[in-house]
Amino acid sequence: MRALSILYVGYPLLKVSDESAGGAEQVLLTLEHEMVAAGHHTAVAACDGSRVGGRLLATGAAATAPDQYERREHEQSACILQFLRENPCEFDLIHDQSGSFFRHAAECPAPALATLHLPRTFYPKELFRTLPPNLWFNCVSESQARTFDDLPNMAGVVQNGIAVERYPLAREKADYLLWLGRICEEKAPHLAIAAAQQAGLPLVIAGQVYPFRYHRDYFEREVRPRISGRVRFVESPSFEDKVKLLRDARAVLLTSTANETSSLVAMEAMACGTPVVAFRREAFAEIVADGETGFIVDTAEEMVSAVGKVDRISPEMCREQLQRRFRASRMAQGYEGLYRRVVMAAKGLAA
């Protein structure tokens, strides 16, 4: 089949790279590399200095101070729209992974597919009130899709995936717990600290505090005062450091209080043969097989109890399930199918 030309739109605030803490940025990077390997032509609109597989359309410097999102979103959108006006036939499709650029779809000369990475309640209602006919959506889990079943032009569900070969299996584990991700109140690393203390185990918190004032205030209030002794903080780990932490951990804790739509952290842990103990938050239960690749729990007390049972989980089972269900190539095949359907549908609209 004919190769496609795709413009990916990244999160406007931070660079896209292996060190990105956000799931949407990691998905974009993995997917774009898969599409390049499959022979498609790609460009990524993202912050200066982003590291991508195809061509980078640099949209401005990443944020360095709190609360610059609106400025960066406007700057990036203006850059993309200017490029599209000057190159109207450059792309078959625009894939928005930023969570916001799709509001400009009516101004774009190509059809747009917007991946909805967040829970429905995180999006302002007005985003979905007036939707142009050249805009399609997809979700990343079945539980999330049920909350968006009223949207027109819903193209389907494609579950996230990871490049499994980049995460070596480890059968022997060290005696510490790991919390990994974007550090903010809804991800609740303070609950992981409490669980680890009750379980009597050291905890490593690894991740990034995004440049939002309320994220930084949360970190200073709830996390930093608890970092000492048996609680260690690894800020913005490199990819290599992240993989080592995942491989060696006795278990990974997912303590989110939000209705999660996916979890790359759970997938990465499973690839390394590391069990996951997660609160019952929507899509977590679609990824973690309770009793097989980890445990799904309802309370902090159950999390502590589950930590004591993680040695029953087989590292080989974790990796086998990950390879079968959440490979990057499987995700890429799903998106390629969506791309071709959207492009064909857009041609029908134009006819």
Image (spheres, helix red, strand yellow):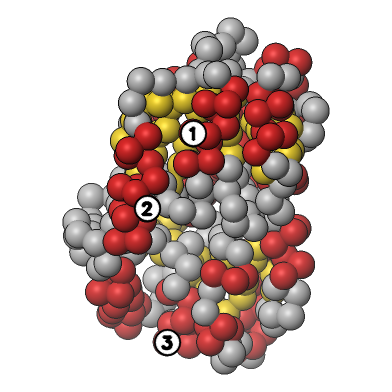
- SS at circle 2: helix
Residue 56 shows in this picture: no
- Dot 1 falls on a residue whose secondary structure is helix
Q: Is residue 125 visible?
A: yes
Q: Which mark is residue 111?
A: none
Q: Where is mark 2, residue-wise? A: 218
Q: Quadrant of residue 349?
A: bottom right
What x and y, as percent, mark residue 41?
44, 55
| 56 with respect to 257 (left or right) | left
Where residue 67 appears, x then y in whole percent?
27, 67
Which residue corresponds to the image point at 70% horizontal and 82% vertical from the top-left?
A: 152
- Pick the quarter of the image with the C terminus: bottom right
Which residue is depicted at the point 38% across and 80% down? 88
Disc 3: CA contacts within 10 A as few (<14), some (14-19) or many (>=20): few
**Residue 340 located left or right of residue 64:** right
Residue at (47, 41) in percent of width and height: 190
Task: Decide which of tag 3 and tag 1 comes sooner along the chain.
Answer: 3
Q: Which residue is mark 3?
A: 107
Q: CA distance from mark 3 to mark 1?
A: 47 Å
Q: Earlier in the sequence, mark 1 or mark 2?
A: 1
- Say what amino acid the circle numbered 2 marks: Tyr
In this view, the mark in front (3 or 1): 1
* Residue 17 percent location from the top left of the image: 35, 44
Decide: marks 3, 1 in contact (CB < 8 A)? no
Mark 1 — residue? 193
Say few, some or many: other residues with alpha carbon within 10 Å of mark 2 (under 14 / 14 to 19 / 20 or more): some
Report the side of 100 relative to 160 (left or right).
left
